[in-house]
Amino acid sequence: MTELSHLPAWRLAELVAAREVSARELATLHLARIARADAALGAFLLVDEAGALGRADRIDAALARGEQPGPLAGVPLALKDIFVTRGIATTVASRILAGWIPPYDGTAVARLYAAGANLLGKLNMDEFAMGSSNENSSVKPCRNPWDLTRVPGGSSGGSAAAVAAGLCAGSLGTDTGGSIRQPAAFCGLVGMKPTYGRVSRYGVVAFASSLDQVGPMTRNVRDAALLLQAIAGHDPHDATSIDAPVPDYRAACERGARGLGGLKIGLPAEYFVDGGGINPEVERAVRAGIARLEDAGATVVPVSLPHTKYAVACYYLVATAEASSNLARYDGVRFGHRAEGTGSLLELYCKSRGEGFGPEVKRRIMLGTFALRSGHYDAYYRKAQQVRALIKRDFDEAFTQVDLIATPATPTAAFRLGEKAADPLAMYLADIFTISCNLAGLPGVSVPCGFTEAGLPIGLQLIAPPLCEEQLFTAAAAHELATDFHTRRPPELA
Ligand code: GLN
């Protein structure tokens, strides 16, 4: 039998509900694994040992009293440190929020607790979710468990590393331009960015509000469905959350076993161009993944998304403009970090912001402020919004012909720490295949579709029309049934 640390989350919930395993046993086992492995990995920013054991005991006591177990009963999760957690420090891996202990739980967190999940701690990330490698964390880098010289991806790098290494059974990340799907691809996980508004952003530290979305990162498709089921749905605290019923995602996964007959999958020419920067090993694995979908009954059709080439530029205008506005609240007075000093208020303000934000965050604030400046607004921000509408229209047109779109999740497998750190533009291109989805507000998932010769995971991305996460789960489940990638494990850390 697979060890408990690598069983699916859905299976752990079954075992706890049947009282074959206790929530405390699961918490203790995973805490021990974290203590053993995380010094090498750097996935955790905070381990809430006492809190996790206390919650586990409360879950076990409720079960002993005969209370109905939740769908995530006793499942040990850990969350990207962007989720606001009551009584547990939340830092977005930034010095500017160091020491902030939130007085409330965000909606996604509260819903996980309500489903019976346990929380082991908070996970490393790029500061304010800005990055593609986790190297922008102000605390420490995080490493890829498949190869410790490589990045886990970003910005939800800690989530990807912890789940892949079996330090927790699943995680939530956030995805503004790829931060769930790209690290999921680099670490061999399933990572889904739902439709914009499907999951509440209340209690999620904002990066770029019109792009940010919360989603699951797990070792298999059904776990992703289980987590999304728990957190999706309307929330009066978030005016952008969609007021639509949440379908049965588990049933959608089960439909994958019946094959994909009748499903039309579009291959966008623009994502597979010669010299487009896609690594040949990645392309081969992605094409093999698409062939598996065809074997399951899907038909593949060429489609065109002609404005793809503008996506990265458009994203970096929209995202930085929104970030510069969102981050204006961290003025060193209202939140967290306060600079020492006796100078003028202005001096104090500049000092605290200077010391509080890392270089990438400062770069984004500068860029965004520049793009929004009067006199620049029409040339940059307004133009970017117009391009964004064209990118969305490309997808609308493609979805009149196909049900899903398939692309690589990333142009390469995980790169080495330091490889792109000095070159922001090279780093920005790591998200070239994931960004359009955020600009268009669409759901997308990355699923493991193979490994490089060096043993690094590769991700296949599937994109659906708004609120069609069910189709993604069905196709992803059908693909998973034809592979064993989700059962492979990175080397055990000492
Ligand atoms: N890598 C992209 C960026 O740096 C996307 C980040 C994200 O999705 N949060 O902005």
Image: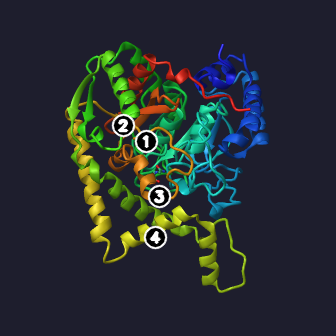
Q: Given the current orientation, which residue lies at the most extreme bottom position?
A: 344
Instruction: Please provide percent x and percent y for residue 173.
Output: 53, 43
Identify the residue under disc 4.
366
How many C-alpha atoms fall within 10 Å of the one at disc 3: few (<14), some, or many (≥20)?
Answer: few
Quadrant placement of the C terminus: top right
> In whole angstroms, how far apart are the C-alphas of marks 2 and 4?
35 Å
- Residues under numbered marks 3 and 1 in contact, where contact means CB atoms less than 8 Å apart: no
285 over 155 or under it: above or below: above
Q: Amino acid at mark 1?
A: Arg
Q: Secondary structure at mark 2?
A: loop
- Which marked residue is nearer to the observer: mark 2 or mark 3? 3
Identify the residue under disc 2.
467
> In whole angstroms, how far apart are the C-alphas of marks 3 and 1?
34 Å
Residue located at (41% from left, 58% from top):
319
> In whole angstroms, how far apart are the C-alphas of marks 1 and 4?
31 Å
User: Which disc number belongs to residue 198?
Assistant: 1
- Which marked residue is nearer to the observer: mark 3 or mark 4? 3
Of labels 2 and 3, earlier in sequence is 3
- Residues under numbered marks 2 and 4 in contact, where contact means CB atoms less than 8 Å apart: no
Of labels 1 and 4, earlier in sequence is 1
> In whole angstroms, how far apart are the C-alphas of marks 1 and 2?
7 Å
Q: Amino acid at mark 4?
A: Met
Q: Amino acid at mark 2?
A: Leu
Residue 177 visible somewhere in the drawing: yes
Instruction: Please provide percent x and percent y for residue 36.
Output: 76, 35
Of labels 3 and 1, earlier in sequence is 1
User: Which disc number belongs to residue 423?
Assistant: 3
- Which marked residue is nearer to the observer: mark 2 or mark 4? 4
Of labels 3 and 4, earlier in sequence is 4
